[in-house]
Amino acid sequence: MRAYQAADWPPVWAIIRDVVRAQETFPYDPAMSESDARATWIEAPPGLTVVATDGDRVVGTAKMGPNRSGPGAHVSTASFMVAADARGRGAGTALCRFALDWARAAGYAGMQFNAVVASNRSAVRLYERLGFRILGTVPRAFAHPEHGRVGLHLMYLEF
């Protein structure tokens, strides 16, 4: 795990492009351009973008920072993406644990996920294993290509 560097953009973009175009786990426009992806994913301070590597290969990425500005800035948020051929080998768990450690060290009061796709069972199980709770679900808020309209969970972990 390390901080994102400009030279990481090509593999990070490849991961983002593939995840977003699959339309299974992120509520991002599948026609998202590369420049829009960069503007959305690369965090400015106080946020942080990181990559997970396997040797020299970037296999995953995460972004983290305040969930809201102003009076809500004491709660963090994070997003994670892992290359399809690297899933199930711990990169997502490592990215999430890194984000939680970063947020705690930065003095945040908790971490909130605003839109976890309910059919993304592996992510939901991971977040619950790490202590997150589902606070509520917006029914049928995500148009999944295989399952149709599924819910989006709001998940939270108080530190």
Image (cartoon, helix red, strand yellow):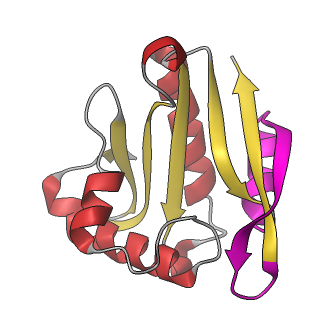
Magenta-colored stretch includes residue 14: no
Quadrant hosting residue 10:
bottom left
Quadrant hosting residue 87:
bottom right
Quadrant hosting residue 12:
bottom left
User: Tag count in the figure?
Assistant: 0
- The image position of residue 157, as x and y in percent, is 73, 28
Nearer to us in this view, 48 or 34 = 34
Nearer to us in this view, 1 or 148 = 148
Q: Along the horizontal axis of the image, is 4 left or right of 124?
A: left
Does residue 26 lie above or below 71 as drawn?
Answer: below
Q: Along the horizontal axis of the image, is 97 left or right of 33?
A: right
Determine the residue positioned at 53% across, 27% down: 76
Determine the residue positioned at 63% across, 68% down: 25
- The image position of residue 58, as x and y in percent, is 35, 65
Determine the residue positioned at 64% across, 41% down: 113
Determine the residue positioned at 57% across, 64% down: 27
- The image position of residue 28, as x and y in percent, is 49, 66
Name of the residue lying farthest toward the left:
7
- The image position of residue 82, as x and y in percent, is 51, 66
From the image, which quarter does the C terminus lie in? top right
Give the magenta-colored segment's residue range.
119-148
Nearer to us in this view, 140 or 64 = 140
Does residue 59 lie above or below 72 as drawn?
Answer: below
